[in-house]
Amino acid sequence: MTDAIDRAAGLAPGDALHALRRLRPEFVDGAELCRVSVLTPASDQGLSPDLRAALARRMALQNADPSLADPYGGADPELRRLAEGETDLPEPLASIAAHVDLVTQTPAKAAAESLRRLERAGLTNPQIVALSELIAYVNFQARIAAGLRLMKEAR
Amino acid sequence: MIASVTLKPLVWHPHIAPVELPDATPEQLEAMKVTPSAKKVSAYVRTLAHDPESYVARTVLFNAIMYAEGGLPRPDRELGALGASVVNGCAYCAVIHGRQHAHLTQSTSLVSAVYLRRLDLLSPRDAAIFAFARRLSVTPSEATTEDIVALRAVGLDDAEILDLIHAIAIFGWANRLMHVLGHAEPQKPAAQPRRTP
């Protein structure tokens, strides 16, 4: 059995690193539960799974991790442009995209004003927190996958 | 010999209004119980409780990564957390995990070297871990196979390297919450003497 991180890192059952990951089942299961909680949560706070998937791809591409970035499969042309990294977008997508880009690429530069912009675009506090967790998760997963690929290459 | 740095915990203030306990939904109340210290509910936990589902899932994973038995020694996990927090600009996390490192090793020499920018004073083992933590934390990652080779050369086995990757990555997560959703200040700001012209 493989999960999203195995697929991103190019691991298959039988690989030494696939087996090594399973020595810490709480890491493997925990990461998968987190992935569900930010991409397809039971309560999505009004941020649709489609929007979340598009943002996840956008951030994976910024992490130079196309293997992690499932192509956006939805029908919405604006979300497709969002997923592919475009910045010329309608609100609230433009503000969400600007925030996602800032926090993914240069989190040190985030400030209160970053959240004020999301509020002006109409996001509620639960949506701001849910968006933050999604951003943070994708950046977590990208680092696990990048680290595993390096371990594989350095054998 | 360099000066010894004593880190004092910072106070975190959210940029958005946290959940107030009287207004919390049953799911939010349940989520907030998952914290390691349930005595009082911090502003940080109450802020994240706006989205209880992700909060619960992340807390479980965070505790597993930072406190799991065996594998990479805990001070090394704290060093990975420190390296990530420096790159991601999370002063609050950097202080907390610098202090944890000093506590676990009973020595402030590493955090002093980091805060005084004297990385040349780190042991080869600490230097390899800290350099990898910083490079893996950049977007996109700047870590290379040379980092892995360096970690093996200072004695880390693959299970320990994988633990380290998780510790660094979970701070790529935690820093993006803590530094983005609020800001940190010294506990008791010292009164600045006013200069009159």
Image: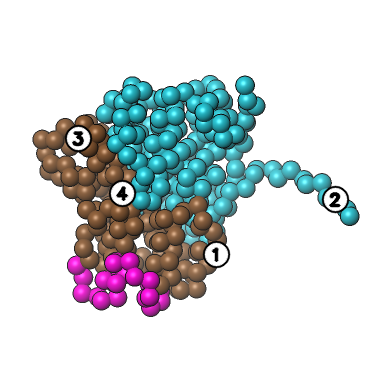
Chain colours: A brown, B cyan
> Which quadrant of the figure contains the C terminus of chain A?
top left
> To which residue does mark 1 refer?
A113
Give the magenta-colored segment's residue range. A73-93
Place of residue A16 in the rendered image (x, y in percent of width and height, measured from the top left): 16, 32
Identify the secondary structure beneath mark 1: helix
**How much space separates mark 4 and mark 3, taking CA atoms?**
16 Å
Labels 1 and 4 in the same subunit: yes
Label at residue A17: 3
Write down the chain letter for disc 3: A
Q: Residue furthest bottom?
A: A90
Q: Callout 1, which amino acid?
A: Glu
Place of residue A39 in the rendered image (x, y in percent of width and height, measured from the top left): 28, 58
Circle 1 or circle 2, nearest the eye? 2
Q: Residues within 10 Å of mark 3 (few under 14, many from 20)?
A: many
Label at residue B195: 2
Q: Residues within 10 Å of mark 2 (few under 14, many from 20)?
A: few
Circle 1 or circle 4, nearest the eye? 4
